[in-house]
Amino acid sequence: MTIETTNADTTAAITDAPQIGHWIDGAPRPSRSGRTADVFNPATGAVIGRVALADEEEIAEAIASAERAQKAWGATSIAKRQAVLFAFRELLNARKGELAEIVTREHGKVLSDAMGEILRGQEVVELATGFPHLIKGAYSENVSTGIDVYSIKQPLGVIGIVSPFNFPVMVPMWFFPIAIAAGNAVVLKPSEKDPSAALWMAELWREAGLPDGVFTVLQGDKLAVDGLLTSPVVQSISFVGSTPIAQYIYETASRHGKRVQALGGAKNHMLVLPDADLDLVADQAINAGYGAAGERCMAISVLIAVEPVADRLIEKITERISRLRVGNGAGDADGEPDLGPLISGAHREKVSGYVDIAVADGARIVVDGRGFVVDGHEDGFFFGPTLIDEIPLTSRAYREEIFGPVLSIVRVETFQEGLDLINSGEFGNGTAIFTNDGGAARRFQTEVQVGMIGINVPIPVPVAYHSFGGWKASLFGDAKAYGVHGFEFFTREKAVTSRWLDPATHEGINLGFPQNR
Ligand code: NAD
C-alpha cells in the first residue's frame, strides 16, 4: 500500500503566525527542523499558527528523553504515581475551560461539545487513578509442595500514541492516563491540524508533578509517525484515525515487533423499527448525525427506516434541521450555535464531493448543505446539515465514510433486511437500534457485527471502565481502548515460580520435566 504524507501545505517560511513546537524533557521545545504546517481557525479560515513537523533528529531526541525518564518513573512507587494522577485530575477539572477554548479555536466544534470531549477524557483519568487495583498480579500458594506461583505486571517502557484531529483531547486521554499510571513514558504525536491541546496537557502534567520526559509531545507528520513505528525503543503504538492509515500503522508497527491497537474509520447505521417513538428518533438522529459537524467516529451517518416510517421521519428531521444554527463554535451575540465548521477547506471540498456523487448516482437531496455561508464568517469552512433520501446502496456516498454533517436515509421492509445491510458494510464501529420491542433489540445485539451498540442510544461510547473499539475495518489488533483492555495493553506480565529451599524438601538431582507433587 502506498500512502502519501498528509501535509500538502508545508513551508519553511517564518511568518507572524505563532510557531507551535514540541514538548520534550518537561519543557516546550521550539522546532529546529524548518518544516511547518499551517494551523487554521476553521470558523474564520485564518492561519493562527504554524506547527512544527519534526525531523529525524527531533524524533530521536524525543524518544531518547522518554526512554531516560521511563526507567525512574517505572521504578517509582505506586503511591507516588497515584498522587501525580490525582493532582492531574484535580488540575484538569479546575481548568478544563481553558482547554475547551483551545479545542474550539483549532478544531471548530462548539464550546460545550469541546467540554464534553474533555469530560469523557477525564473519565479515563479518573479510572486510571484506581490503577493499583487493576495492575495487581495474582498469587497461587503451594502449587506443588513448597512452591508458589505469582504474576506481576510491569510497564512496557516507552509507548507511542498517534491521534486524529477530531478529538484532540479525548482520544489521547483514552490511552495516556492508563499508560502513565502503569509506569510507562508516553510520546504523543497529535494531529497536525489541532496540535495545541496536547501542549496544554503536557504543561498540566508538569504542574501535577510528573517527572520531566514521562510525557512528550512530538509534533509532526508521516515522518514523525514512521519514526515511532520503526524505533526499537518504542514498545507499543496506540493509533486512532482513518482506516487506510490504521491498517498501515498496524502492519508497519507489527512488523517492527510492537504491540499495536489501531482504531480506524466508521460508517455508523441507526436502525429504526416502526414501533419506535419517532420524535425521540428524530431528535437523536439530529444529535448524532450533525453534532460536531458529523466529525465523530461514532456519528450516525445512515438511518435505516423499516417502513412505513421513512416519510414521517424525514418530515420530522427536516423540520428540526430548519431550526439548527451553524456558526462559530466559540459563540456570538446570539450565544452558542448548534454546530461549527469542518476542520479544513480541503475537507469541506471532500464532503461536498460526496454529496455531488450521491446526486450523480440518483439520490434525492432533501436538505442541501453545499455552499453554506455564515454571515460574517465568509472564509470559514462551514457546511450546512444535509439530508439525503433514496441513496443507492452502490453509491460511494453510501458505502464510504464522509465525516461531515450528512445523514442518509435508507428504506427497508423488514428488520432482517436492515440487519443484513449493517452486517454487509466494511466498518463495524458503532450502531444503534430504536424500538420498544425488547426481543428485537436483544436479537440485534446478538447478531449485529459491530463493536459498540446502542439500544435507543445513538452514540454508544462506552464509559471508561468498559472498553472502546469497533470490529472489522474499524479496529486492527485485538486490544480496544481504555477499560480493562487498556491496562492489559500497557503492561507486560511475568509469571514467577518460586521455592525457598528447605533441606527437608530438597529432592536432589532429577533431570525429568518438573511435575506438581
Ligand atoms: P488520519 O488518519 O488522517 O490521521 C490520524 C493521524 O495519523 C494523524 O496524527 C496524522 O498525522 C497521522 N497520519 C496521517 N497520514 C499518515 C501517514 N500517511 N502515515 C503516517 N501517519 C499519518 O485521520 P484524521 O483525519 O485525523 O481523523 C479522522 C478519522 O479518524 C476518521 O476516519 C474517523 O472515523 C477516525 N476516528 C476513529 C475513531 C475510532 O475510535 N475508531 C475515533 C476518532 C476518529
Image (tube, rainbow, N blue to C red):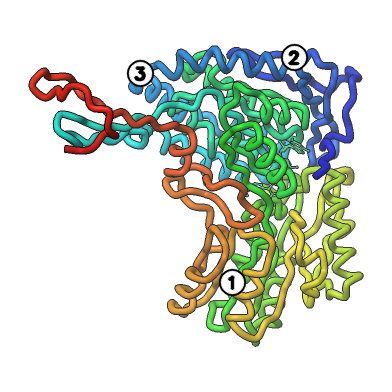
Label 3 or label 1, whichever comes before in sequence order? 3
Name the side, left or right, on which 352 lies relative to 77: right
Question: Quick one: label 1, few (<14), some, or many (20+) residues within 10 Å?
Answer: many
Q: Residue at x 83, y 28 (%)?
A: 37
> In the image, residue 247 lies at what x, y percent?
69, 46
Q: Residue at x 77, y 48 (%)?
A: 341
Q: Which residue is mark 3?
A: 77
Q: Residue at x 69, y 16 (%)?
A: 60
Look at label 3 and name its amino acid: Ser
Label 2 or label 1, whichever comes before in sequence order? 2
Q: Quadrant of residue 371?
A: bottom right
Label 2 or label 3, whichever comes before in sequence order? 2
* Quadrant occupied by the C terminus: top left
Q: Is mark 1 within 8 Å of ligand 1?
A: no
Name the side, left or right, on which 342 lies relative to 431: right
Question: Quick one: label 3, few (<14), some, or many (20+) residues within 10 Å?
Answer: few
Look at label 1 and name its amino acid: Val
